[in-house]
Amino acid sequence: MQSTYLLLFRGILCEVLLLQALYAPDSVLEKWMWLAFPIYAAAAAAWFWAMRRERIPAAWETWFFFVDIAFTSTVLYLTKGFSSDFYIAYFLVILASCFLEELSYSFIVGGVASLVYGGLAWPAEGVFEQPFYLLRTSLLLVTAFFATYIAGMARRTRVAVGESYNRQLAWMHRLTVVGRALAGVLHEVKTPVSTVILSVNYIRGRLKEGDMAGAEAQLGIIEDEAERAAAILGDFLEYTKPAELTLKPLPLRTPLQRVMDVQSIRLEDRGIAASLDCPEGLVVAGSERHLVQVFTNLVMNSINAMPLGGRLAVTARRDGGRAVVEVQDSGEGISRETLDRLFEPFSSTRIEDSGTGLGLFIAQWIVQKHAGTLAAHSEGKGKGTRILVVLPLAPDL
């Protein structure tokens, strides 16, 4: 933008000097001197092109202002225009120099313009009989000083306002991140808390029927889910700082079976036919509570994708030195656009269910901490979703 303004200024300067040359009554410009105008215009255009292509040091920009002063002085000298009103061309040079990044250079340009005008325009004799020369020189010097001062104040104000704006913007950004993170915590904790509430209602029904064994089993689930809610809060703290999970040999069926048992009430209420197929001897290197969080998130997503019932199949198999867990549902499916950004933070496909978009993001983070991968596949809306979790087997296998 600065280069555009300077090109505009030089166009106006060329116009002013051209008017002086055309209408000065004592103009003595030779024909070859008229070539100075297109040469100056071409040089100004070339300088504009150079400034647009790359950043030019302030010292180099200053030198072209000396070219402006030289061009102005030459035209006014040959046309005897120092006593005319066209001496304002020097004011144009002084004011335009305020676009220089270093204001000290601007003051130098203003001082040089004033001295050049004073030196060339000053009459050899009768100085006191023609005081307007001294007045004009003084005005040029004062203009150079105040233009530089005002430009400096404007830049300092812009910097101060910009810094204040950036601080406010950073503060608002932090509030946004904190709010989203808090929403993510509440979203993740909501699952075990909801399970506790469902289990309490289930226990009441079992107690009325005198089924103490069923009630006892649900009490164990309530205890596990309460502990998981506390662990989820710890996971968010771990997520905000570099941390390594404690991995140890873990039968893969253990976290999978725990998740299916906990979600059994939801599956039954939704009319979802669920199955789990995992070999007993499939052992991975993992953290049980973290894998429970991953599989809970995947199973909950599948349940939410089947509000009118359907089928959910969770299978696990060995693939070389890895275990592959597949969570397949017959739910709503995922569009290609959503699938591409499914694991991005704060990207949710369940706005109506107050989804925050952090569940799959954190699940992916946990799987990556296990040196595994998490991927989603879907043929599109209404065609179900298939999630693949690949985890390394325990080293001793």
Image: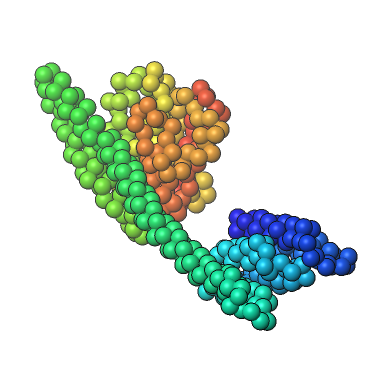
* Residue 145 horizontal side relative to residue 359, left or right: right
Q: Position of residue 221 (x, y in %)?
A: 21, 35
Q: Position of residue 156 (x, y in %)?
A: 43, 63
* Residue 76 horizontal side relative to residue 389, left or right: right
Question: Is residue 213 placed above or below 123 in the rendered structure?
Answer: above
Q: Which of the two residues, 354 or 297, is positioned nearer the viewer here? A: 354
Q: Position of residue 146 (x, y in %)?
A: 48, 67
Kindly tell me whether residue 307 is visible in this rendering: yes
Question: Is residue 36 placed above or below 220 in the rendered structure?
Answer: below
Q: Which of the two residues, 275 or 157, is positioned nearer the viewer here? A: 157
Q: Which of the two residues, 297 or 80, is positioned nearer the viewer here? A: 80
What is the image's colouring?
rainbow
> For the N terminus, which image quadrant?
bottom right
Question: Is residue 215 placed above or below 283 in the rendered structure?
Answer: above
Q: How many marks?
A: 0
Quadrant of the image occupied by residue 60: bottom right
Q: Position of residue 370 (x, y in %)?
A: 41, 53
Residue ID at (37%, 40%): 359
Kindly tell me whether residue 49 is visible in this rendering: no
Residue ID at (33%, 54%): 240
Residue ID at (26%, 35%): 190
> For the C terminus, which image quadrant?
bottom left
Residue ID at (68%, 56%): 12
Q: Residue reaching furthest bottom? A: 124
